[in-house]
Amino acid sequence: MTSDTTGRVLRLLSLLQTRREWSGADLAERLDVTVRTVRRDIERLRELGYPVDSARGHAGGYRLTSGTDLPPLLLDDEEAVAIAVALRTAAGGLTGIEETALRALAKLERVLPRRLRGQVAALQGSLAGIAWEDAGPRADPALLAALSVACRDHEIVTFDYTGRRGVGTPRRVEPCHLVASGGLWYLLAHDTDKDDWRLFRLDRISGALPTGRRVRPRPVPGDDPAAFVAERLTAAPVRHRAVATVHASADHVRARTRGLAARLTPIDEHTCRLDASDDDPRRIARMLAGLDTAYTLEADPETADHLRASALRALRALS
């Protein structure tokens, strides 16, 4: 291929990687060529091993599909740096992803241009991570990837879900969004049998299967998935109750804590309420430890005993 043709085919490949499907006319307009030239360039990509599907019809359409091998990806400078840093810091809430991320990072860094290696090295040198030995339940990366695709394609999924009492039930849902909160991953979806929105913890999902049936996306109540999930999480029944009356304004606490905005309720200019209730008293302790001001606490006996024992161990260590 000539240099002009090679450059155009690379631009075509980059376009195919940014959208699920392109019409031939849209690609021709973007590349400033004819539809016939687009067809020829698509054939060149296929000869190079890229699995490009064609849609039938007058307008035609093309999409890059999955094949037997992963073809090379085209990344611009910012995308390459972002992926390298994300791989370097990948960990939270996913089972066994750390080693896989480091292998992928090694491959990426091997081919990074010199001008980008310095940026990645500087960013990595300024980042630090905290690995909790007891981070709670962790989600399966394969499940996360499968549900991500289902959310993107608005494809109905079936799975078995184990509730808080340990009872499993079959579910059929329209996936909407995946949300990470408090070290856990959640799927926000519309349950087709219950005809209502539901929140599912990924570590309680098993046997997830796509059905092949796609539906129109449903608008999330309030048009803000993250806010909707936060509201559901705070309203959901939990095993351990802990509500702190904090002697500081809600704005003060919000600015000094992470991920607690939905749990804070202002009482007046100098006081707010923090709902730290959770299924795990250890997460309650970590949440309260982030407060930098005095508070009083209402808690169930088991939670109070756990917090009291933790405080006594700290005091004995100091003495």
Image (spheres, rainbow, N blue to C red):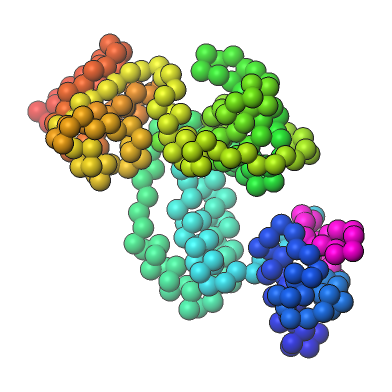
Visible residue check, residue 123? yes
Residue 231: x percent and y percent?
42, 31
Counting every numbered tag in the picture gives: 0
Residue at (27%, 41%) from the top-left corner? Answer: 254
Give 107 or 244, whichever is nearer the viewer. 244
Residue interval drawn in magenta: 45-67
Report the residue that reaches farthest toward the left: 319
The x and y percentages for residue 131 are 39, 43
Picture layout, residue 68 above or below residue 288: below
Task: Specify the quadrant of the image occupied by residue 249.
Answer: top left
Kindly give the residue lying farthest to the right in the view shown.
57
Give left or right: position of 238 versus 291.
Answer: right
Quarter of the figure that contains the C terminus: top left
Q: Residue furthest top?
A: 301
Q: Quadrant of residue 253?
A: top left
The percent coordinates of residue 168 (x first, y second) are 62, 17
122 falls in the magenta region: no
